[in-house]
Image (spheres, helix red, strand yellow):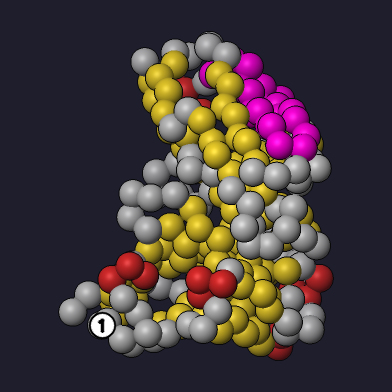
Amino acid sequence: QVQLVQSGAEVKKPGASVKVSCKASGYTFTAYYMHWVRQAPGQGLEWVGWINPNSGGTNCTQKFQDRVTMTRDTSISTAYMELSRLTSDDTAVYYCARSVAHRALDYWGQGALVTVSS
Amino acid sequence: AIQVTQSPSSLSASVGDRVTITCRASQGIRNDLGWYQQKPGEAPKLLIYAASSLQTGVPSRFSGSGSGTDFTLTISSLQPEDFATYYCLQDYNYPWTFGQGTKVEIK
């Protein structure tokens, strides 16, 4: 069965970076795009970006373009999202989710809470 | 970026009620819209993709309709497990954008 298992909760100080992982199993990792979506406490969902695990190509919303780095390690079927220069506004649950081509997010990870606090 | 306006932001309903949630896109997006259900402390779950296609395993009381700019999610007979927050997501072009969410509460 398809599973996306994310790394655990993190607490970071303002200005630091955080790297969240998402390990895929139950399907061919390189056949599906991996997206990242975040949700601030009590707020709605915000799309961050995607990585094509086959080519390594990425795309993200302009808001994060200079702060987010998405990578993958195909040998262990794992995608990563690193966010730098953290502020308190980055406190959120970060989800990975896969898509079939560029259509819908059919499986999601359990989420990783990132807390930014001094 | 395409704006997606979802309404209402919340609603109260009883078990057995018919519930309708709408999303309006700021420009035409063909049928490139999905609906997601999220329960507290859980990841979102895909219900409907391509505006009207039911995701495998999702009960048939959920249905979606619309194309272009106006879309609707309907729950034909609300069940206790359906009390949750619902989001639409346009996947027509990047950046993908979510609606603001609709919280469905027990009346």
User: What residue is rendered at 81% in x and 71% in y?
Assistant: A31
Is residue B64 magenta-colored?
yes
| Label 1 Cα crowd, 10 Å radius (few <14 / some 14-19 / many 20+) | some
At horizontal 54% and vertical 36% (from top left) the residue drawn is B6
Tell me where residue B46 appears, x and y as whole percent. 64, 45
Residue extending farthest left? A118
Q: How many marks?
A: 1
Depicted A70 relative to depicted A9: above or below: below
Residue B105 on image: x %, y %: 39, 25
Q: For the residue labelled by badge 1, is the local secondary structure a helix, a strand or a loop?
A: loop
Q: Is residue A103 magenta?
A: no
Q: Is residue A27 left or right of residue B79?
A: right
- Residue B57 can be seen in this image: no
Tell me where the magenta segment starts and ends, as one range: B59-78
Residue B50 position (above or below residue A85): above
Residue on which disc 1 sits: A13
Chain ID, mark 1: A
